[in-house]
Amino acid sequence: MPIARAYAVAPVGVEGQVVEIEADLGNGLPKFHLLGLPDAALQESKDRVRAAIVNSELVWPDKKLVLALSPANLRKTGSGFDLALACAVLGADEVLPQPELDGTVLLGELALDGRLRAVRGVLPCLVAARDAGLRRAVVPVAALAEAGLVEGIEVHGAACLADVVAFMRLGEPLSRPEPSAEDEVPEPPDLADVVGQEDARHAIEIAAAGGHHVLLVGPPGTGKTMLAQRFVGLLPRLAPQEALALAAVRSVAGRLVSGGALTTVPPFVAPHHSSSMAALLGGGSGIARPGAVSLAHRGVLFLDEAPEWGASLLDSLRTPLEEGEVRLARADGTVHYPARFQLVLAANPCPCAPAHDRDCVCSSLVRRRYLGRLSGPLLDRVDLRARMFPVTALVATGHAEDTATVRARVLAARGAALQRWGALGFRTNAEVPGPVLRTRFALPRSAVRPLDAGLRSGQLTARGADRALRVAWTLADLAGRDRPDEDLVETALFFRDRRAA
């Protein structure tokens, strides 16, 4: 009998590798051999596939069966190969025609009665299949809306193995994805709800305009969490490619919201301070799964009660903050997940955290030790620090700007930054490397005089000076100026003052 071929995809992070499954029926004692570095879940698929075929009123070939998954040196994990394995077996037994299997990627887990169950990572798997030249995909009905987000490949949804056989053998139609609905964006909480806190509001506006990280320090009840939750409302909506990248991360993590529409709202992720390293950065057995830093890609990662986090957890954020991705190495391979987020840290000024400083019972040494849990290298990567003070009146004396007003300024500033840096491949001031700021866009010596003084006195590191320059450019964009002057550089240094923490 001829060798049958079917196609599946092995997910590797937010990417995938097309796997060719060859099935050969030969003479000998009936036995099922599965080759190609399968993991335990895939090894168990032999029993699931056999039961699904028999319970779908099809005949299991009573011969020696060899299934080879290629590339053979790639570790295959998960149950998403079940459907492709079953179709390869049926193709080798000449139940399914090979021309129908060619160019078709098959994804899904089989139940013992032949039902198809959804698996994680359908979206990035279909992107990989499309890029590899496969023209058609069959997925479980439960994953049809997610699969429909991928353009350039014909997607069909099946409820069971019998439906797939009828589709390929008799041409009976399968379900097709509905047109993507318009994304319904919920109204975020309004910035006008925050009473007072002018410095902190200004810091949040600067951070949103330039893509900077921010630290908020103040007693309980001053609005730190409120400001962080309203931060997302100031950010621009995600572009289609950004929304698709975020959806791929959520798909791998099993967090993709069903409905068939890409969300363009930047994510807001706020893990608890008791979270583990795997929950924060990603991890797990086999191929590591994405953590909070990747789920916050192109959005906001909010760490409340930052000094309560473990030092190792906080310091593990250094690489994602600098490089915009996280690399997780495991025995089964190394995966890369995107992690370009804006970090918002919130902290009380001391462990006792009274409503007012006059009621504090902590010594100066205890206060320094408490905030000292935020290491110097981490704080050096935080561009803005703002001190928040107790609210003295429930009714604001002046007019508090709402989100729409501030967001308009933020979008205008981002537009100016994109016009300046777009030709160099950068979109926000926070992304621009220091050498570019110091050479092609160097400021006059009079403007950078405060930075030179900070470097000579040891109050600034070279990284800190570059970050202050980026904040100064953001202040210039918000003010509608062509470039920063000395006053704006001093304002940027004001927001980097360690005394604010």
Image: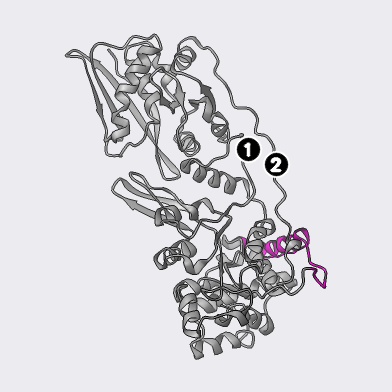
Q: Where is the C terminus found, in terms of image quarters?
A: bottom right
Q: Quadrant of residue 275?
A: bottom left
Residue 485 versus residue 337 in the image, above or below:
below
Q: Residue at x 42, y 40 (%)?
A: 16
Q: Regarding mark 1 in the picture, which secondary structure is present there? A: loop
Residue 365 versus residue 194 in the image, above or below:
below
Q: Identity of the amino acid at label 1?
A: Ala
Question: Can residue 443 be seen in this snapshot?
Answer: no
Left/right placement of residue 165 relative to residue 90 reads: right
Left/right placement of residue 267 relative to residue 161 reads: right
Query: If you read the primary sequence from the N terminus, does the residue marked by circle 1 or circle 2 appear first?
Result: 2
Give percent across and percent down for residue 230.
67, 59
Of 240 and 250, nearer the camera is 250
Q: Identity of the amino acid at label 2?
A: Glu
Q: Main secondary structure of the magenta part?
A: helix
User: What residue did someone put label 1 on?
Assistant: 261
In the rendered image, residue 322 lying in the magenta stretch gets the answer no
User: What residue did someone put label 2 on?
Assistant: 184
Classed neighbour count for the residue bearing mark 1: other residues with Cα under 10 Å, few (<14), some (14–19), many (≥20): some
Give percent across and percent down for residue 205.
68, 67
Check whether the beta carbons of the residues at disc 1 and disc 2 lie within 8 A of each other. Answer: yes
Q: Quadrant of residue 207?
A: bottom right
User: Where does the magenta region start and end?
Assistant: 395-422
Of 320 and 295, nearer the camera is 295
Q: Where is the N terminus found, in terms of image quarters?
A: top left
